Image: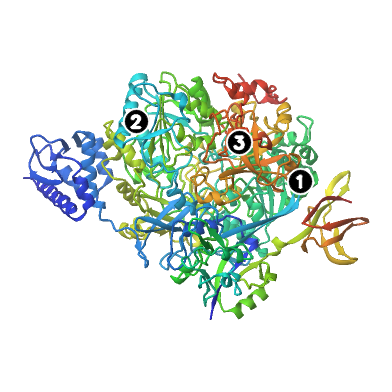
């Protein structure tokens, strides 16, 4: 049977927040019986956009990552809920029953992703339920997916084997997969969020003026072995991306004609080395 | 009896039947009929025949003939005219002509007559079938927000949800552009800006004005207590009392002081809709009543109007250029785009939602091979979305970067010398300045580095890369200007130098143009639907672009303000407090109109003593706005009425608040991103042209009312109602607008209002608008579809060349040679900002440069505050201890130096005021620069208004209101020097300017006095015209 999955492309999210606004539009002041009680106007982030700023100086980038209930196949909240308060549907959607879940704060605590929210006024746990009432009414996309201007957020309904193949072919990752809850929310280009880069701009003196060193060679090594090599662009820039954060000591060696420089880097977050003068 | 008389008799008999039938069928209509006991006569004077209608206790009786004592009467000169004018479908030109020729006249009480006329018109519209029923029992209507078109789902009188529009099978297929082997087609749907998706929260905001309210200590017949404005509370009053108060104050002030005594002030934007827009209903009202106009500066154009226009014309586009065909040309032919103070991902162009985003996303396709460069002090949203090289000049300085690029091109022989020789004039003069021949200072990359902080090597690399690639230059949010650096102190220089750069590259050649894919989409531009600036029902043939096309298509009574007095908006507080203010004209008819002075008071006019204010956006959006607090508390303003949807900003300084409803509670019609006038063919921003019937989704909340209703009711007390609304209901104007457009050729009125939207059919590929400036490059007659410049502004043959005196791109501007303005020399020169790193003691005291660009999530004040969903966005506001604070961004090192951590409450301040914000350290700014959006809706002084810290986020309390140059009415306040420190918990902030009890001397004068004399260019004498 086909099931719902959410696929999010981190490279295409602009932090426009239409998905979060559409979710507020859908749930604040609206009750969908059998599905959800109204969402508080403030305080809940059923869709929460994380962000990561990488680098320093004028070599930086920013990744935005919409997160939400992962509709895990091995969902701790289903186990934590009493009296069938939390159920897993055949189409993959996890539902927290707004009536049966009353008073069950432990459901909030059970989520390792922090994506079950406690409604203090109604004394119920709440989450983004994949807009199940809309899917059941024939919608092909969630509110966030429908309104996303760049297609960064897309719901797909396929069977699990096809989804697994798609994830493998397209390099999709799940958030904190090590938790083992088998999320149904997948990310493309998540490396922009959870890896680091080492970059810099190479310069040299030409005819008494400082110039960008285009075409210089930058070599990245770790533990004595070369990992990657780049030619600097017309601004003298190089950028080794996709490195693990906090991954220790690296060496960057720059060479251009006869000149060369060696820089030692201990990588925590991303590093922009700034101008490297040959 | 003549045939005409017989016909009129039949029509009038039919009218009785229609009235009675409608009252039986619609309880709402029956209730209306019961509102008044009145006898109304319709008659033909020549034949002395007619029919009377008696409304009494809700019953309608009628009789043939002339009633002895009718309350009101509509008289036609003869039966032929009467029969003709009363036979549907109505010919509006005939109706208007009959009124102008006095062949149709009215007698009796204006209000009752208007009621009678509107009642008759209501029989036409009350049965309209609007909206599409849904399976879940809701109804789907359509509407248009400033942030894009919406489906509005309504159930049990409540808006359930609002969504963007997915097209159905009957809607047209979109266009395709083929570029470098890639086929590019936009999706079959509309997009939204964040504030558009926030609409429901704005409608149901707890900050709505729901009832007429009077300030508690305001007594029109006794103590008015103007000094308490902004402090004292309000008491609910009835509409009748409110209407009496505002109409009697209009009459009293006019009779007491004379014409022009009432100023009318509105924001630069409104809720969307061509009939209800401020340029429509408000303009008709204010002209009917007579007013002193608060004359706007060209607020998002600034440098383009006061600067760039001298180089290339386009005064009717406020100095920004034509944009046609540039999406196709850019995708097919360009290899690089330089975004220069351009952040379309934040600003959505203008009302363009995320349509440009969809197109710019294509640039990520490596097959197109388009490199991106961003030049901005802030790593903006467009830089985040479209990776590329980022150069970060200090605010206001990138003029120097541009000059250094030009210097490299000259030095290394990298510019288009043939084009410069054939298509431009005055290059040698500018070249001499750049090379240092004039002032001994060559404008080298090293020279600019000292000024901007951008490494010289990066500027050289950019200059060379630019010269090696066919490049689009994209200044401002539209890609040809708008917003960004044109709004700061060097904005005029910046816009000017942008034109000079593209002139050196051969503007108009394939792949060489202005744009960032925000404008220039290949939609059908021959299909006519009016933009909002075409004035709707305003009748204002002077203050809107109504005369261009809409006036002929939608005949209406013209309106004209009889007062010749204007207040230059930037100096409105000075005008009120000191009784004097000078500015310059924003009028696009020619380049030279801008040299005309606007002085208040106008000779022989009354001083302004009453203010009719529309909404509360000024404190958040104008500059140095503690001045406004002082103005509002001045006894020089005897009466302030504010007609506002939300109780926010300076709405809280009014004596009387009239509650207006949103566009979701009234009827209107509009097209997405259709600006008209100064933004001719704004529809080029969208991928699919969409016209919307803006259905009233719900009834107005509380006792709020449509602006149209409010104006009508005030007019009734002034005898002006029939002049104001021509006896029509709002929906009748909507239908008139529909009929005036090209819509009826494609869709019936009935179908249009049922479905709610219409997608304009896609243009055939070979009929798409030509590329801008291609005609110019190819020395052909102008062939892009814009009716400008005006014919007499061509120096040579009509349509040959640009609007400039030479018809060419002018490096040395003839218009500035004639103007003899030392601050705007004929060639553009770099003059550092008067509020920046060169400001000496002020810079030492306030060492951070604050930039205040347009906001990403709200649309100026719209969407902000109001307890809306936007408050949940941590890049917009952040909640700390129960209050949502405005975000101030600063470089992590600047933050650390001050002991500031993420979301600390910090005081952002200078001598103009202080604002409490939540700090956000970020590498998106280079050191020394801080960033906060320009326009919050909330003004929340923590103590005495004007003298305490604001925690609403009004950064414009801190920005300078001084104009960019003395000879322009140009906003310069997108940049200010400030200091930021961790808040010490104190709420007082007595700034120097506000410490004195008496009104300060005109700040303009004081600041100029404190500044060294403007350097006279050595070569200036030779530009001065012979005396």
Residue under numbered circle 2: B246
Image coordinates for residue B295, horizontal then vertical, percent: 48, 31
Q: Are marks 2 and 3 on the same chain?
A: yes
Q: CA distance from mark 3 to mark 1?
A: 36 Å
**Disc 2 versus disc 3: distance between alpha carbons?**
34 Å
Q: Nearer the viewer, residue B277 or B801?
A: B277
Q: Quadrant of residue B96?
A: top left
User: Is label 2 in a helix, a strand or a loop?
Assistant: helix
B146 left or right, relative to B478: left
Query: Dot 1: what SS?
Result: helix
Which mark is on residue B704? none
Label 1 CA crowd tier, 10 Å (few <14, some 14–19, many 20+): many
Q: Earlier in the sequence, mark 2 or mark 1?
A: 2
Q: Assign a secondary structure to mark 3.
A: strand
Lower sequence index among marks 2 and 3: 2
Which numbered disc covers residue B915? Answer: 3
* Disc 2 to disc 1, C-alpha distance: 60 Å
Check the residue under mark 1 and report the chain it is in: B
- Residue B459 marker: 1
Q: Is residue B879 above or below residue B629?
A: below
Q: Is B413 positioned to the left or the right of B566 in the image?
A: right
Chain of the residue that carries numbered disc 2 in the rendered image? B
Looking at the picture, how far across and down is residue B50, in whole percent? 10, 42
Quadrant of residue B1024 in the image?
top right
Above-or-below relation of B437 to B1008: below
Q: Residues within 10 Å of mark 2 (few under 14, many from 20)?
A: many
- The picture places residue B921, in percent across and down from the top left corner, at 69, 46
Side of B484 relative to B601 (left or right): right
């Amino acid at each position: 049977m086909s099931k719902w999955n959410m696929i999010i492309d981190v490279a295409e999210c602009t932090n426009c927040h239409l998905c979060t606004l559409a979710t507020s539009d859908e749930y604040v002041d609206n009750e969908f019986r059998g599905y959800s009680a109204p969402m508080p106007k403030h305080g809940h982030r059923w869709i929460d956009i994380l962000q990561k700023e990488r680098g320093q100086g004028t070599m930086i980038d920013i990744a935005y990552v919409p997160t939400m209930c992962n509709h895990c196949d091995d969902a701790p909240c289903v186990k934590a809920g009493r009296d069938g308060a939390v159920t897993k549907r055949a189409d993959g959607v996890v539902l927290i029953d707004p009536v049966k879940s009353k008073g069950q704060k432990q459901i909030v605590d059970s989520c390792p992703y922090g994506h079950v929210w406690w409604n203090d006024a109604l004394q119920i746990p709440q989450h983004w339920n994949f807009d199940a009432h809309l899917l059941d009414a024939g919608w092909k996309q969630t509110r966030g997916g429908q309104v996303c201007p760049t297609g960064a957020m897309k719901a797909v309904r396929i069977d699990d084997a096809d989804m697994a193949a798609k994830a493998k072919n397209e390099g999709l990752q799940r958030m904190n997969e090590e938790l083992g809850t088998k999320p149904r929310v997948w990310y493309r280009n998540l490396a922009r969020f959870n890896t680091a880069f080492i970059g810099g701009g190479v310069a040299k003196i030409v005819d008494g003026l400082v110039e960008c060193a285009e075409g210089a060679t930058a070599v990245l090594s770790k533990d004595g072995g070369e990992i990657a090599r780049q030619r600097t662009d017309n601004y003298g820039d190089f950028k080794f991306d996709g490195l693990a954060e906090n991954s220790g000591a690296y060496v960057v060696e720059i060479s251009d004609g006869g000149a060369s420089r060696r820089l030692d880097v201990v990588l925590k977050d991303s590093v922009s080395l700034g101008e490297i003068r040959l | 009896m003549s045939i005409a008389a017989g016909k009129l008799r039949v029509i009038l008999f039919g009218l009785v039947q229609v009235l009675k039938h409608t009252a039986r069928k619609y309880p709402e209509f029956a209730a209306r009929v019961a509102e008044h006991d009145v006898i109304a006569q319709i008659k033909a004077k020549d034949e002395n025949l007619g029919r009377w209608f008696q409304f009494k206790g809700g019953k309608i009786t009628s009789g043939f003939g002339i009633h002895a004592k009718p309350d009101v009467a509509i008289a036609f000169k003869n039966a032929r005219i009467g029969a003709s004018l009363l036979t549907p479908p109505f010919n509006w030109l005939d109706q208007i002509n009959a009124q102008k020729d006095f062949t149709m006249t009215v007698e009796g009480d204006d209000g009752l007559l208007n009621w009678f006329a509107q009642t008759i018109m209501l029989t036409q519209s009350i049965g309209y079938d609007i909206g599409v029923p849904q399976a879940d029992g809701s109804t789907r209507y359509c509407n248009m927000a400033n942030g894009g078109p919406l489906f509005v789902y309504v159930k049990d009188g409540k808006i359930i949800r609002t969504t963007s529009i997915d097209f159905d099978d009957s809607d047209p297929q979109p266009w395709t552009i083929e570029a470098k082997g890639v086929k590019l087609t936009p999706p079959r749907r509309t997009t939204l800006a964040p504030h558009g998706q926030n609409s429901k929260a704005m409608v149901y905001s707890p900050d709505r004005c729901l009832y007429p309210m009077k300030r508690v200590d305001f007594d029109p017949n006794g103590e008015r207590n103007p000094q308490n404005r902004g402090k004292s509370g309000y008491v609910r009053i009835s509409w009748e009392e409110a209407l009496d108060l505002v109409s009697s104050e209009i009459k009293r002030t006019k009779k007491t002081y004379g014409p022009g005594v009432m100023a009318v002030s509105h924001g630069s934007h409104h809720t969307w809709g061509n009939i209800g827009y401020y340029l429509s209903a408000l303009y008709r009202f204010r002209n009917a009543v007579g007013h002193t106009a608060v004359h706007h500066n060209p607020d998002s154009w600034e440098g383009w109007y006061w600067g760039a226009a001298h180089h290339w014309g386009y005064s009717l586009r406020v100095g920004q250029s034509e944009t046609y065909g540039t999406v196709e040309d850019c995708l097919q032919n360009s290899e690089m785009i330089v975004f220069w103070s351009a952040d379309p991902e934040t600003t959505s162009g203008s009302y363009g939602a995320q349509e440009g985003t969809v197109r710019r996303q294509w640039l990520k396709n490596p097959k197109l091979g388009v490199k991106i460069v961003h030049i901005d002090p802030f790593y903006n949203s467009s830089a985040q979305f479209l990776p590329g090289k980022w150069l970060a000049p200090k605010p206001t300085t990138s003029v120097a970067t541009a000059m250094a690029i030009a210097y490299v091109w000259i030095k290394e022989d990298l510019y288009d010398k043939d084009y410069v020789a054939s298509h431009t004039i005055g290059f040698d003069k500018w070249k001499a300045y750049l090379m240092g021949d004039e002032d001994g200072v060559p404008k080298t990359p090293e020279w600019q580095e000292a000024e901007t902080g951008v490494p010289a090597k990066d500027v050289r690399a950019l200059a060379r890369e630019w010269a090696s690639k066919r490049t689009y230059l994209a200044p401002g949010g539209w890609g040809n200007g708008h917003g960004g650096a044109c709004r700061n102190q060097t904005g005029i220089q910046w816009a000017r130098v942008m034109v000079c750069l593209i002139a050196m590259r051969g503007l108009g050649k394939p792949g060489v143009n202005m744009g960032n894919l925000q404008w220039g989409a290949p939609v059908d531009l021959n299909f006519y639907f009016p933009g909002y600036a075409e004035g709707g029902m305003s009748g204002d043939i002077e203050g809107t672009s109504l005369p261009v096309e809409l006036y002929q298509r939608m005949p209406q009574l013209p309106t004209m303000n009889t007062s010749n007095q204007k207040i230059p908006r930037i100096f409105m507080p000075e005008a009120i407090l000191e009784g004097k203010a000078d500015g310059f004209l924003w009028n696009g008819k020619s380049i030279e109109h801008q040299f005309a002075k606007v002085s208040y008071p106008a000779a022989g006019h009354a001083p302004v003593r009453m203010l009719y204010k529309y909404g509360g956006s000024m404190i958040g959006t104008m500059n140095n706005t503690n001045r406004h607090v002082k103005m509002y508390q001045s006894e020089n303003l005897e009466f302030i009425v504010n007609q506002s949807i939300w109780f926010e900003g300076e709405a809280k300084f009014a004596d009387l608040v009239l509650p207006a409803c949103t566009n979701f509670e009234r009827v209107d019609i509009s097209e997405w991103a259709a600006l008209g006038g100064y933004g001719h063919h704004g529809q080029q921003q969208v991928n699919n042209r969409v016209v919307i019937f803006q259905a009233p989704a719900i009834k107005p909340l509380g006792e709020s009312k449509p602006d149209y209703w409010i104006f009508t009711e005030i007019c009734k007390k002034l005898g002006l109602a029939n002049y104001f609304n021509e006896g029509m209901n709002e929906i009748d104007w909507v239908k008139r607008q529909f009929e005036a457009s090209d819509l009826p050729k494609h869709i019936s009125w009935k179908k249009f209002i049922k479905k709610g939207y219409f997608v304009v059919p896609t243009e055939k590929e070979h009929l798409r608008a030509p590329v801008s400036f291609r005609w110019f490059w190819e020395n052909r007659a102008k062939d892009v579809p814009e009716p400008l410049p005006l014919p007499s502004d061509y120096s040579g043959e009509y349509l040959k060349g640009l609007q400039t005196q030479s018809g060419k791109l002018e490096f040395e501007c003839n218009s500035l040679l004639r103007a003899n303005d030392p601050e705007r020399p004929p060639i553009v020169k770099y003059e550092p900002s008067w509020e920046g790193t060169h400001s000496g003691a002020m810079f030492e005291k306030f060492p951070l440069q604050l930039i205040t660009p347009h906001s990403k999530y709200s649309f100026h004040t719209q969407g902000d505050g109001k307890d809306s969903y936007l408050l949940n966005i941590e890049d917009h506001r952040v909640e700390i201890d129960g209050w949502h604070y405005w975000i101030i961004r600063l470089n992590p090192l600047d933050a650390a130096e001050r002991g500031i951590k993420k979301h600390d409450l910090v005081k952002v301040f200078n001598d103009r005021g202080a604002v409490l914000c939540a700090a956000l350290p970020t590498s998106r700014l280079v050191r020394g620069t801080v960033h906060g959006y320009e326009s919050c809706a909330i003004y929340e002084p923590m103590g005495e208004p004007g003298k305490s810290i604001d925690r609403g986020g009004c950064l414009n309390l801190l920005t300078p209101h001084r104009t960019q140059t003395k000879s322009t009415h140009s906003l310069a306040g997108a940049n200010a020097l400030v200091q930021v420190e961790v808040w010490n918990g104190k709420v007082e902030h007595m700034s120097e300017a506000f410490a004195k009890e008496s009104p300060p001397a005109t700040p303009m004068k004081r600041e100029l006095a404190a500044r060294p004399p403007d350097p006279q260019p050595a070569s200036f004498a030779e530009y001065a015209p012979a005396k």
